[in-house]
Amino acid sequence: MSSELLALARTIAVEAGELAARRRREGVEVAATKSTIVDVVTEADREVERLIRGRILDARPNDAILGEEGGSSSGTSGLTWVVDPIDGTVNYLYGIPHYAVSIAVVEGDPDPLTWTGLHGCVLNPAVGELFSGSQGEGAFLSVAGGPDVPIHAAAPAPLELALINTGFAYAAATRAKQGEVAARLLPMVRDIRRFGTASLDLCMVANGRTNAYFERTLSPWDHAAGAIIAREAGAVVKGFGDAAPSRDFILAAEPELAALLEPVLIELGSRFEL
Ligand code: LIP
């Protein structure tokens, strides 16, 4: 069943990605705003999630689903599909070819602090990159439908040579504090990147394109699949201290760099009250 679940997630992600890309070509508009005026949803986000939900329930009627746009639906199998139909919605709205369909399968309650990540796939339809991973079975990248190539996190790097990606919240007050932390971190590292799509940020670490990623205020669907892929690629993916990654904090990096970077981020004030 293990590989069947991942195969199903990948098949659904590819179909969902084709729909998202088609709607993008046709033109997208803001359908509504959510937590703040800059936290937008497009009609395509909703349509793509409806498609994903329908395909999951056709194949797995007893599974639960937790999705960004449609909320949660319960199940009896003990498995939950965690879905972000279009992660990086602001990029998608602006036509920046860096957004993703993110689908994970987890076991246990749909709570990142307690769930067990089993399978994850993250597809960037704009460039045809499909990242995937399953617990204990490694992480892979397939480009344009090509073969699955194993991927690994970057080798250990000293902080001053680390390329780090991060992100900022939709709430202006939180963004201000995150910006201060990033400003203080900048002279201590190689450079910082802000790509705008958490699921792909985690896949960047998994593929060694960056050395470390950290962010606060993410929702479960933003990081569920990417965290599984980054872990299977050899990265540590964690919250503060012994906590699992969650809305409070996520850090993903090669183990030695993670151990270096976390205390520095705390020292720089990253652990402010949310
Ligand atoms: C986004 C994340 C991004 C984060 C944004 C937002 P969305 O998810 O991918 O990393 O910085 O605040 O959470 O809203 O596009 O699904």
Image (cartoon, helix red, strand yellow):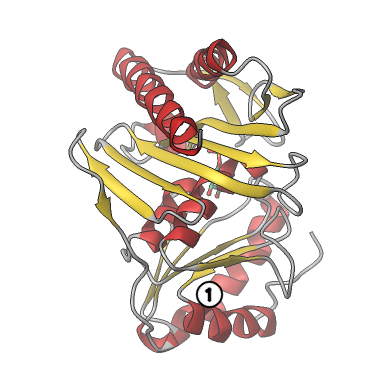
The spot of residue 207 in percent (x, y) is 33, 60
Q: Name the residue located 42 percent from the left edge and 36 percent from the top edge.
A: 100
Q: Name the residue located 38 percent from the left edge and 24 percent from the top edge.
A: 11
Residue 161 against residue 20 in the figure, above or below: below
Left or right, 175 with respect to 30, comes to right
Q: Which residue is mark 1?
A: 183
Name the residue nearer the viewer: 4 or 101. 4
Image quadrant in which you'd find residue 19? top left
Q: Quadrant holding ligand 1?
A: top right
Rendered-image quadrant of the C terminus: bottom right
Residue type at mark 1: give it.
Ala
Q: Name the residue located 72 percent from the left edge and 35 percent from the top edge.
A: 35
Residue 266 against residue 121 in the figure, above or below: below
Residue 199 against residue 258 in the figure, above or below: above
* Count of labels in the image: 1
Q: Name the residue at the right extreme.
A: 273
